[in-house]
Amino acid sequence: ASGREIRRRAPAVLELVGLGHRLRAYPHELSSGEQQRVALARAIVNNPAAVIADEPTGNLDPDTAWGIVALLEEINRRGRTVIMATHAQGIVDRLNRRVVAMVQGRIHRDDGRGGYGHGLS
């Protein structure tokens, strides 16, 4: 998308991630959770078919982490594929979505039942 188109979409995308009120804020003025949500907004402003989130909840407090997960779920509900890499067992278990477990760079398990503990031994 052009710069003009991105500027037009930015307010709506920031609203989606709960940061419409921070449109004019500089990065140093944002908390780490807000910065994570801005990263998601930047990822989706061009309407990609897929969003890849590598440890999107890392270094966040539990409430903020679950907020990020909720945003990824909303992005998925809006028709985008979301691929999330995480070591957070609680998040994986609670989402109950397809899990592809990798060990030393190889697929160890691909389970549609979701959950961290199914057959990872």
Image (cartoon, rainbow, N blue to C red):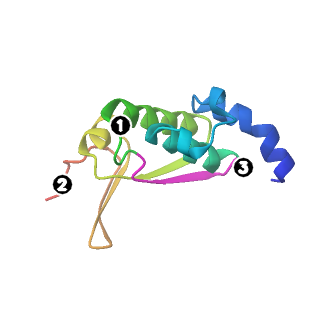
Q: Earlier in the sequence, mark 1 or mark 2?
A: 1
In the image, which is nearer the foreground, mark 1 or mark 3? 3
Question: Residue, x 43% and y 31% (percent of image)?
Answer: 67
Q: Mark 2 points at which residue?
A: 119
Tell me the tag on residue 48. none
Q: Mark 3 Cα within 10 Å, few/some/many (few <14, many 20+)?
A: some
Question: Residue, x 65% and y 34% (percent of image)?
Answer: 14
Q: Is residue 24 left or right of residue 38?
A: right
Q: Earlier in the sequence, mark 2 or mark 3?
A: 3
Of the 4 image quadrants, the one containing the C terminus is bottom left
| Residues shaded magenta | 46-56
Q: In which quarter of the image is residue 74?
A: top right
How far from the left and from the top, in percent, is residue 87? Answer: 28, 52
Classify 16 as above or below 57: above
Q: Mark 2 Cα within 10 Å, few/some/many (few <14, many 20+)?
A: few
How far from the left and from the top, in percent, is residue 105? Answer: 32, 73
Tell me the tag on residue 46. 3
Amino acid type, mark 3: Asn
CB under 8 Å between discs 2 and 3 = no
CA gap between label 1 and label 2 equals: 17 Å
Amino acid type, mark 1: Leu
Q: Which of 86 and 113 is in front in this view?
A: 86
Under circle 1, the secondary element is helix
Q: Is residue 33 visible?
A: yes
Q: Mark 1 Cα within 10 Å, few/some/many (few <14, many 20+)?
A: some
Q: Quadrant of residue 96?
A: top left
Q: Name the residue under label 1.
A: 95
